[in-house]
Image (spheres, rainbow, N blue to C red):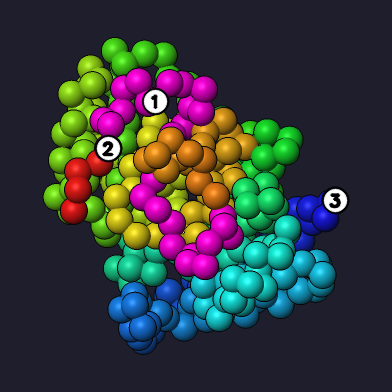
Amino acid sequence: MQDIPQDALIEIVSRAGDAILEIYSGDFEVLDKADQSPLTQADLAAHEIIVQGLAAVTPNVPVISEESVAPDFSVRSQWDVYWLVDPLDGTKEFVNRNGEFTVNIALIKGGQPVYGIVGVPVQDCIYLGNVQEQRAWRYARGNLQPIKARQMTSDEQNLVVVASRSHGGQRLEQYLDQLAERFAGLTRQPVGSSLKLCTLASGEADCYPRLGPTSEWDIAAAHAVLKAAGGEVYTFDRKTLNYNSKASLLNPEFIAVADADYDWWDVLPPQPPQG
């Protein structure tokens, strides 16, 4: 796939966001999926818009969406390029009506996100990242504004950490306590959904440790935005997070960082606390 249909993708994400907001503004039913995660009409409406839109602009590129059944690994392991979609990340934020939910489309090539688009319907903005060009943007009111993750200077600076509004627990608290000992100060910034990685990409925070389960579609689009802005997502065995490399679509625990050139392993706690 040579050319990424950026304008068409912006339109698809915008239409999905509009459909979500229409449901968000009224009463809606919340169902429980098999894993006990919430599902709403908005998830399904956005899914239909995105899948149909991608089929129209890239008919030969397969799609994996959270709201569809993923092909068996024996099939998808043969794919070099595919779309990975989370039509509504942050359904808990949607249900709680705090606005921190997103629409996510990632292009995966060779096990890595190479392009990502993250819509934030309530903010009427879209984050985009082209990893090959090493360029990331924030699209709002018809304008593309470049964004760049901020660089680390030393462990003498104050570290800004983004954390989940809906997930955490004692292990995360212990990890943050250990992290605070390694820097001059630590500020915690609660953020929901894939906005956490976009917050890193836009220069507003330094790292995001995720202790607990996530799926590949939860972070792929924002991972691409972060990579394009100068950051990265690492597993705790110091490897770059890969996609479509195993039968399960669950991610290992990870830490996302704004500055991929900084020697994080020199200052990070060696391993997160065991559960």
Q: Quadrant of residue 52?
A: bottom right
Q: Which residue is mark 2?
A: 271
Mark with earlier residue (1, 2): 1
Q: Which residue is mark 1?
A: 264
Residue 48: % across, % down: 62, 80
Identify which residue is drawn at 19% across, 43% down.
Answer: 273
Assign the magenta stretch its main secondary structure.
loop
Check if residue 155 falls in the magenta segment.
no
Check if residue 268 falls in the magenta segment.
yes
Mark with earlier residue (2, 3): 3
Q: Amino acid at mark 1?
A: Trp
Q: Which mark is residue 2?
A: 3
Mark 1, residues whose alpha carbon is within 10 Å: few (<14), some, or many (≥20)?
some
Q: Is residue 113 left or right of residue 122?
A: right
Q: Which residues are magenta?
A: 243-271
Mark 1, secondary structure of its residue = helix
Identify which residue is drawn at 56% across, 80% down.
Answer: 68
**Image height check: is 173 above or below 58?**
above
Foreground pick, 113 / 77: 77
Work out which quarter of the rendered image holds the N terminus and state it: bottom right
Q: Is residue 37 left or right of residue 49?
A: left
* Nearer the camera: disc 2 or disc 3: 2
